[in-house]
Image (cartoon, grey):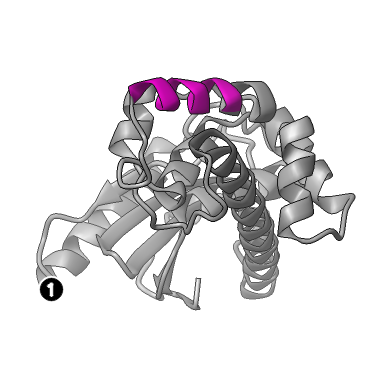
């Protein structure tokens, strides 16, 4: 979330509920991390965030220019109209995607935070949560890649595996794939199919799929293993194999 700024053209009807704020986000954006940051923000402000999804994503169909701006306004107005006067939540959110590095985050916020000072504070808080989630996600990804590397080395009988090494070029086949997915379930928690491994035949791509399948308890357990030791990669491989 490299750059964020409020779009001044967001309109509202003056009610205290559902006032839309449009925030343009330029640069690389991890949507899953942004959703996690929004969920954390909602929890902090006692907002019921159990309903799914917290952050629906809509792709803007119009090409850049006036047509896209008009489409953007329609989304903002529709979101405002969907929020009734009985709505008591601090905010609702949606993400409008124009391109890979061009997004607009629309927040329908309660009037209590619609003033410039309050909304800037809300944005600062969201940015803080996002940066914390990015850091946590990076640490989790690193730990998961190390754990999967250890599993591949053990099952494939090799000393080293790079993140982009192909499972099949390392001598992998269906029986070894079965051993790997069973070991992943035993040591890390999530169930991953052999087909998933075949379709994601490097540690780097498989880590993404395994991470998506992990529960919060799985993530906490994995991070506890790597947080409790300052040992090098070889020692971590041995530790992971003994879990």
Residue 153 in the image, given as x and y percentages of width and height: 56, 44
Q: Main secondary structure of the magenta part?
A: helix
Residue 105 in the image, given as x and y percentages of width and height: 43, 59
For the image, the number of numbered tags is 1
* Picture layout, residue 2 above or below residue 185: below
Asked if the magenta segment contains residue 175, the reply would be: yes
Question: Furthest-right residue in view?
Answer: 228
What's the residue at 35%, 64% (across, down)?
103
Element under disc 1: helix
Observer-nearest of 13 and 100: 100
Residue 60 in the image, given as x and y percentages of width and height: 20, 56
* Picture layout, residue 67 above or below residue 30: below
Quarter assignment of residue 12? bottom left
Residue 64 in the image, given as x and y percentages of width and height: 14, 72
Observer-nearest of 150 and 135: 150
Quarter assignment of residue 127? bottom right
Asked if the magenta segment contains residue 120, the reply would be: no
Which quadrant, please, contains the C terminus? top right
Observer-nearest of 197 and 28: 197
- Residue 46 visible in rendering: no
* Picture layout, residue 214 above or below residue 164: above
What stretch of residues is rendered in magenta?
A: 174-183
What's the residue at 39%, 41% (across, down)?
56
Observer-nearest of 45 and 198: 198
What's the residue at 50%, 54% (across, down)?
161
Query: Disc 1 marks which residue?
Result: 66
What's the residue at 54%, 20% (across, down)?
182
């Amino acid at each position: 979330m490299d750059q964020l700024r409020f779009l001044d053209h967001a309109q509202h009807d003056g009610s205290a509920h559902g006032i839309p704020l449009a925030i343009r986000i330029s640069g690389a954006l991890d949507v899953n991390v942004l959703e996690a940051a929004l969920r954390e923000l909602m929890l902090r402000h006692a907002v019921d965030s159990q309903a799914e999804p917290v952050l629906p994503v809509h792709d803007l169909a119009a090409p850049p220019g006036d047509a896209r701006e008009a489409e953007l306004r329609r989304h903002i107005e529709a979101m405002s109209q969907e929020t009734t006067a009985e709505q008591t939540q601090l905010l609702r959110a949606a993400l409008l995607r124009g391109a890979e590095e061009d997004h607009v985050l629309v927040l329908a916020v309660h009037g209590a935070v619609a003033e410039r000072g309050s909304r800037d504070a809300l944005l600062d808080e969201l940015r803080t949560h996002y940066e914390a989630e990015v850091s946590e996600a990076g640490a989790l990804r690193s730990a998961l890649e190390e754990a999967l590397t250890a599993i591949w080395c053990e099952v494939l009988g090799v000393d080293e595996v790079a993140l982009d090494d192909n499972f099949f070029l390392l001598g992998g086949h269906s029986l070894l794939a079965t051993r790997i997915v069973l070991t992943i379930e035993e040591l890390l928690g999530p169930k991953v199919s052999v087909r998933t491994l075949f379709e994601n035949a490097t540690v780097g791509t498989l880590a993404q799929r395994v991470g998506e399948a992990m529960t919060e308890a799985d993530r906490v357990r994995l991070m506890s293993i790597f947080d409790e030791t300052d040992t090098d990669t070889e020692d971590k491989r041995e530790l992971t194999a003994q879990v």
